[in-house]
Image (cartoon, rainbow, N blue to C red):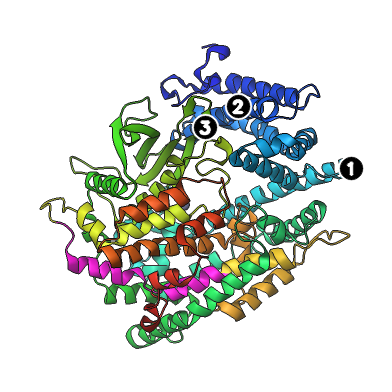
Amino acid sequence: MNAPEHPLLHPFQLPPFDRLRPEDVEPVITELIARARAAIERAVDERTPPTWEDFVAPLERALEQLSDAWGVIGHLHSVMDTPAWREAYNQMLPEVTRFWTELGQNEALYRKTQALAQSPEFARLSPERRRVIELDLRDHRLAGAELPPEKKPRHRDIQQELSALSAKFSENLLDATNAYQEWIEDEAQLSGIPEEVRAMARAAAQAQDRPGWCFTLQMPFYLPVMQYADDRALRERMYRAHATRASEFGPPERDNGPLIERIMALRGEEALLLGYPDYASYSLVPKMANEPEEVASFLRELAARAKPFALRDLEELRAFARDRLGLDPLEPWDIAYASEKLRQERYDYSEQEVRRYLPLPRVLEGLFALLERLFGVRLVPDTAPVWHPDVRFYRVERDGAPIAYFYVDLYARDTKRGGAWMDSAKSRRREGEFLMLPVAYLVCNFAPPVGGNPPTLTHDDVLTLFHEMGHGLHHMLTQVDEAPISGIHHVEWDAVELPSQFMENFAWEWEVLEKITAHVDTGEPLPRTLYEKMRAAKNFQAGMQMVRQIEFSLFDLRIHRELARAQEPAPERVPLADVLRILEEVRDEVAVIRPPSWHRFPQSFSHIFAGGYAAGYYSYKWAEVLSADAYEAFEEASARTGTVLDPDTGRRFWREILAVGASRPAAESFRAFRGREPRIDALLRHNGLIEEASEAHG
Ligand SMILES: [Zn+2]
């Protein structure tokens, strides 16, 4: 097919999955980039007036075509990662990345958008369009568009060096993880380790033509060893190896310490260039939290509430380990092991037992019925070209009319990236009479059915499904007409998990589980006694888990506040000793478990040194507060109506949270739904971190 005729070169409602070939990627994307560049040139041309119709709309259309087409290719790269697709994707990735970086820094575009924002036309635009322009100006500023010409090259160099350092950080960590091998020849040393993990370790040894068992530091080996291995010395060896990965205790070429020193310095310099006092302040600009102090006091309040429970968890564990397991003192490499033994003793049921009650078709049916009841939307099976025979396609209807389309791809495949996610294929956009509907992908990695048995889910799988469905609803139930702020686009990083974590709550409700469960043999719903055990186990060691997350969050925030500071002249490096000192201070303040002094946690904290979470790790807890508090509105409705599945509250949640996208700040949406500011009480209560007596007031 010649590039000019290719379906990706025209706007589409549904991706043309039946007509996509890897060899078309290069010509099609090259053509779309050329068109986008031409659109930018027309936009900044002085003969083009700075109006919505002449300046904004045509450029937005050209950019959307490129991002939609590239989005489809990126999606295939994630779910059909064959050598041909991988090569096609990687070949064009640098070109596409360069295009978006240059767009962000384009000063002419920025100045013209500013001119529009200051013109009389601006006041006549709809509130949604004004919001699009304001966010666009902000994005340009954060990308360095306002920098004087002599400072731009330095800013670009910093970006380049930071992205290379991030990549190196992950590579070091991966290499260090893979470099360690624990060889076991004596089967007695495997005592306690589950059969399937032993089989993996045996296979790993056989792959190297050696007898015995080989364990590495990858999670599927490391976690079970720490949880189940009765051999304390084995646990200690692996704990040490894991805790010192990519540090000065290993080969220097894999040491992440010097990388951290450089990354922190460059982040400080970036803040300096862009006019912020420190990197944390810069990172928070597009987020819901306003400033580092607000985040710090949020984390400290949560810590103060959770710490007594964490201490109690730890005391319980110490006593159990001492009295029942003879482990005294409780060492760091005993914690997971003793915890697992305590959990088994206290809540005696297995995931496998629950799984028999959760056949996938029944769960999906129940989830769809829940959506119909809460939001009045129906998911109707439909047909469209898909990328794999397992993929299901649905039309989302309200009052008999389609409002979105939805692809669901649930089973693990060797061509699919791990994990679960929701992604946008199209965003809702209105142009005059024409309405483009939002389209979403939901992708999971559930175990595929074996033999003729119906596929079943673990309860964790069900939580994942509900979680991703929440993201999907956020994208598909949007009522915003401007694509850049419709659905999930431009929703604040620390608020985007609100609808997803919110939906998880329903998967813990008896009224819901009663309906979505049916034993694969008998068809019986989940027994109430088994449900009670699941509920009880839900908050096992919740206090310890909470303070651990707070420790990571506060450490991340403080180093980006105190060490990545804007100072002149910018230092070459930030001493690693300072990073470690802050970690110790944070632990003094919030932690209950003290890792040994040789533990090198920062060197493997890739979320903040190699991912997008720098000064943003707190987002998980922040969004959880919002989602728990929002869910509490349903619990309050239940106290009045006898059911959490309250359609009135559901419609309100749709109108104020799901429908509005980024057309207004997330804080405003939350207040509109809840009638007040968020409170942390619901989260604490849901995690069992609140005394019964104080529960009555909410
Ligand atoms: Zn999520």
Looking at the image, which residue is at 34% across and 54% down? 648
Snapshot quadrant of residue 196: bottom left
User: Which amino acid lies under the numbered mark 2 shown in the image of this protein?
Assistant: Arg
Q: Nearer the viewer, residue 464 or 482?
A: 482
Q: Label 3 sits on what residue type?
A: Arg
Q: Which residue is mark 3?
A: 429
Q: Position of residue 421 (x, y in %)?
A: 44, 45
Given residues 116 and 105, the one toward you in this image is 116
Q: CA distance from mark 2 to mark 3?
A: 10 Å
**Which region shows up in magenta?**
525-551
- Label 1 and label 2: CA atoms lie apart by 32 Å
Q: Secondary structure at mark 2?
A: helix
* Residue at point 42%, 42% (across, down): 477
Which quadrant does the C terminus fall into?
bottom left
Residue at the spot 20% in from the left edge and 44% down from the top edge:
454
Closer to us: mark 2 or mark 3?
Answer: 3
Q: Secondary structure at mark 1?
A: helix
- Mark 1 and ligand 1: say if the CB distance to the nearest ligand atom is below 8 Å: no
Residue 586 lies, in percent from the top left, at 62, 75
Neighbourhood count class around disc 1 (C-alpha, 10 Å): few under 14, some 14–19, many 20 upward = few
Amino acid type, callout 1 = Glu
Compared to residue 106, the image places residue 532 above or below, namely: below
Residue 60 appears in the figure: yes
Where residue 613 appears, as percent x and y from the top left, is: 60, 56
Residue 61, numbered circle? 2
Q: Are marks 1 and 3 in contact (CB under 8 Å)?
A: no
Residue that mark 1 sits on: 150
| Label 2 crowd (10 A; few <14 / some 14-19 / many >=20) | some
Is label 2 in contact with label 3 (beta carbons under 8 Å)?
no
